C-alpha cells in the first residue's frame, strides 16, 4: 500500500467515528433535543466496549453492550431534560462529565491493554484496483455499515412518516401534538437512538480504530460530532462529507507530527472545544437558527403547552 493509499484508507476509518456519532446526534437534534453529552456517551461506551471485547474476544458482543451503555446514558439526559424539563445544555454537559468520569473508572484496570482489530473485508477483484481498491474495498465492515446508515437515516428523515414526526417535534412540538404525535415519546426515542450511535462510535474507536484502552482516548470527537451537525446544517449529505473532512484532518495531524513539525499538542486538544463554543454562539439566537436552517425548537423544553 502506497503512502497515499494508506492516508486515504486511514481517512475513511477515522471518519467513521465522527460519522456514527454525528448521525445519532442529527436524529436527536431533528426532534428538538440538543444533547451536548455525546463526548461522555462515547467515552463510557468506548470503555465498556473495550472491556467486554477484551474479556469475551467478541467484537460483536462489545459493540452490542457498548450500544446499550450509550442508550443508558442518553436516557439519563432524556429523563432530566424531557420529563423534568431541565435546561438541555446544562443537562448535556453534566451527562458528558458523568460519562467521562465513569469511563475512567470502568477502564482503570485495562489501561494500555490491547485487543485485536478484525481483519478488513477484501472484496475480490475490486480490492486489486490501484489506489481505489485499497481505499474503498479493503475496509472493516463498520465503515460500510456507517455509510449505509447515513443513507437510511437520510431516507427515514425525509421520506417516511416517522421522519416527518421527528422533524415536526423539532420544528413545532405543539403542532406535532395537535397531529396526535407524542412529542415526549418521539424525543425519548430520538435521544436513545443518538445514544446507541454514540455507543457504536465509542466501541469502534476503542476496539477497531485504535484497539486499546487509554483514559481520554475519545479526545474531543464527541464535541466534533455535535459541531458537524450544525456545520452540516442538519443535512445528512453535508454531515457525511464533514465527517470525512474531519477524518482527513485527524489523520493529517498525525502525519504532520510524524514528519517532525512542531504542532503544540495543547492547541490540537483545545480545537474541539473552540469549535463547540463557536457552534453554541451560532445557534443561541433565533436569527442564527434561521440562517442555519436549524430545527426551530432546538434546545427548547416542551411541557405540553409552549416550547420554552
Image (cartoon, helix red, strand yellow):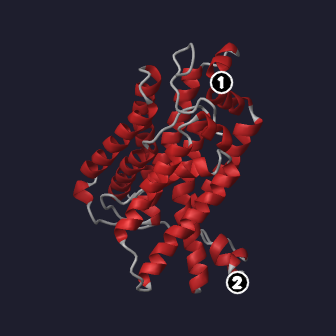
Residue 167, given in percent of the width and then of the height, sits at 67, 31
Labelled disc at residue 180:
none
**Residue name at image x 41 percent, y 67 percent:** 116
Residue 12, quarter of the rendered image: bottom right
Disc 2, SS: loop
**Residue name at image x 47 percent, y 24 percent:** 82
For residue 262, side relative to residue 161 (left or right): left
Camera-side residue of 146 and 78: 78
Of the two numbered discs 1 and 2 on the same chain, state the one appearing first in sequence.
2
Is residue 111 placed above or below 75 in the rendered structure?
below
Residue 93, quarter of the rendered image: top left
Asked if residue 72 can be seen in this view, the reply is no
Label 2 sits on residue = 130
- Mark 2: give few (<14), some (14-19) or many (20+) Cα within 10 Å: few
Asked whether the residues under the numbered discs 1 and 2 touch, taking CB atoms below 8 Å apart as contact, a structural biologist would say no
**Residue name at image x 67 percent, y 20 percent:** 176
Labelled disc at residue 172:
1
Disc 1, SS: loop
Asked if residue 213 can be seen in this view, the reply is yes
Is residue 7 placed above or below 161 in the rendered structure?
below
- Mark 1: give few (<14), some (14-19) or many (20+) Cα within 10 Å: many
For residue 124, side relative to residue 35 (left or right): right
Residue 222, given in percent of the width and then of the height, sits at 46, 51
Amino acid at each position: 500500500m502506497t503512502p497515499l493509499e494508506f492516508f486515504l484508507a486511514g481517512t475513511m476509518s477515522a471518519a467513521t467515528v465522527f460519522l456514527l456519532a454525528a448521525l445519532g446526534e442529527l436524529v436527536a437534534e431533528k426532534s428538538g433535543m440538543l444533547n451536548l453529552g455525546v463526548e461522555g456517551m462515547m467515552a463510557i461506551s468506548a470503555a465498556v466496549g473495550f472491556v467486554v471485547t477484551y474479556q469475551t474476544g467478541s467484537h460483536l458482543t462489545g459493540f452490542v453492550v457498548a450500544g446499550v451503555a450509550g442508550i443508558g446514558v442518553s436516557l439519563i439526559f432524556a429523563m432530566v431534560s424531557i420529563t423534568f424539563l431541565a435546561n438541555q445544555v446544562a443537562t448535556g454537559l453534566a451527562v458528558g462529565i458523568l460519562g467521562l468520569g465513569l469511563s475512567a473508572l470502568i477502564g482503570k484496570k485495562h489501561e494500555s491493554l490491547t485487543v485485536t482489530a478484525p481483519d478488513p473485508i477484501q472484496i475480490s477483484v475490486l480490492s486489486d484496483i490501484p489506489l481505489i481498491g485499497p481505499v474503498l474495498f479493503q475496509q472493516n465492515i463498520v465503515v460500510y455499515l456507517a455509510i449505509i446508515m447515513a443513507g437510511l437515516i437520510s431516507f427515514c428523515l425525509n421520506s417516511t412518516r416517522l421522519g416527518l414526526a421527528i422533524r415536526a417535534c423539532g420544528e413545532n412540538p405543539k403542532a406535532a401534538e395537535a397531529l396526535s404525535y407524542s412529542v415526549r415519546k418521539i424525543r425519548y426515542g430520538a435521544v436513545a437512538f443518538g445514544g446507541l450511535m454514540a455507543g457504536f462510535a465509542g466501541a469502534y474507536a476503542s476496539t477497531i480504530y485504535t484497539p486499546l484502552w487509554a483514559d481520554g482516548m475519545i479526545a474531543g470527537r464527541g464535541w466534533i460530532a455535535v459541531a458537524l451537525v450544525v456545520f452540516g446544517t442538519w443535512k445528512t449529505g453535508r454531515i457525511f462529507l464533514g465527517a470525512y473532512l474531519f477524518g482527513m484532518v485527524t489523520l493529517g495531524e498525525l502525519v504532520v507530527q510524524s514528519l517532525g513539525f512542531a504542532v503544540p499538542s495543547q492547541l490540537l486538544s483545545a480545537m474541539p472545544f473552540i469549535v463547540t463554543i463557536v457552534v453554541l454562539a451560532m445557534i443561541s439566537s433565533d436569527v442564527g437558527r434561521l440562517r442555519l436552517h436549524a430545527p426551530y425548537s432546538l434546545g427548547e423544553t416542551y411541557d405540553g403547552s409552549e416550547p420554552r
